[in-house]
Image: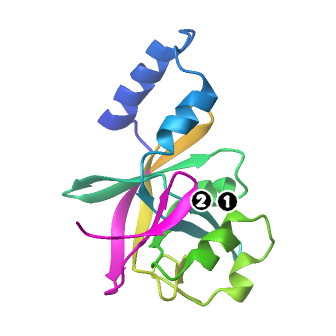
């Protein structure tokens, strides 16, 4: 993989930050970030015939041409090495009735997909049945920052259902309510 312009800029940014103290401690940062509401997703992948997934809100659109997103994954997460090896992942945007699935994938159980209805997408990664939407991605770039890696993914497949997404805010699940 070549170092693209995003990775080059992020690498330079990371170098500029090293060794400089932060005025904000980790607990304060977490408290502030809890005020940022986000869709609840399950990031899923496959490796050597086994399926893996974890609950996440750290998903971001990068651009529409070409369709690209990024996910932030802690390198200590057990799904991390499988995404890294596979080079592909799915973002399953959970529907408002799937809180139980979010909690299931937030846990540390083995064989998580054994009890969750799913199909296998074109990239060989699991897509959760009943999700509000999903995106299938090939990893285009990897950027290491602190404890995490950003996986920039080229979207190669998608699906949308007419369901409202599950939202997470201030350590609680919620529903979309339009003003």
Where residue 116 sits: x, y (%)? 65, 86
- Tell me if residue 139 comes above or below residue 107 in the rendering: above
Q: What span is colored magenta in the figure?
A: 152-179
Question: Residue at point 59% right, 63% down?
Answer: 55
Q: Is residue 99 left or right of residue 176?
A: right
* Residue nearer the viewer, 119 or 59: 59
Is residue 64 visible to us here? Answer: yes
Q: Quadrant of the N terminus?
A: top left
Q: Is residue 166 shown in magenta?
A: yes
- The residue that mark 2 highlights is 83
Q: Main secondary structure of the magenta part?
A: strand
- Tell me if residue 119 comes above or below residue 144 in the rendering: below
Where residue 43 sits: x, y (%)? 54, 65
Where residue 65 sits: x, y (%)? 18, 57
* Residue nearer the viewer, 117 or 52: 117
Q: Which mark is residue 79?
A: 1
User: In the figure, residue 156 lies in which quadrant?
Assistant: bottom left
């Amino acid at each position: 993989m070549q170092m693209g312009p995003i990775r080059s800029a992020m690498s330079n940014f990371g170098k500029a930050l090293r060794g400089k103290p932060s005025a904000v401690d980790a607990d304060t940062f977490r408290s502030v970030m809890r005020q940022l509401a986000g869709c609840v997703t399950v990031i899923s992948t496959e490796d050597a015939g086994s399926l893996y997934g974890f609950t996440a809100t750290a998903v971001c659109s990068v651009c529409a041409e070409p369709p690209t997103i990024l996910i932030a994954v802690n390198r200590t997460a057990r799904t991390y090495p499988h995404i890294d090896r596979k080079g592909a992942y799915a973002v399953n945007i959970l529907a408002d009735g799937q809180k139980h699935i979010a909690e299931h994938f937030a846990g540390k159980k083995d064989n998580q997909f054994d009890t969750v209805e799913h199909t296998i997408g074109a990239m060989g990664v699991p897509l959760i049945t009943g999700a509000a939407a999903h995106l299938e991605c090939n990893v285009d770039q990897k950027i290491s920052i602190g404890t995490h890696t950003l996986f920039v993914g080229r979207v190669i497949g998608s699906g949308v259902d007419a369901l409202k997404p599950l939202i997470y805010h201030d350590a609680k699940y919620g529903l979309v309510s339009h003003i």
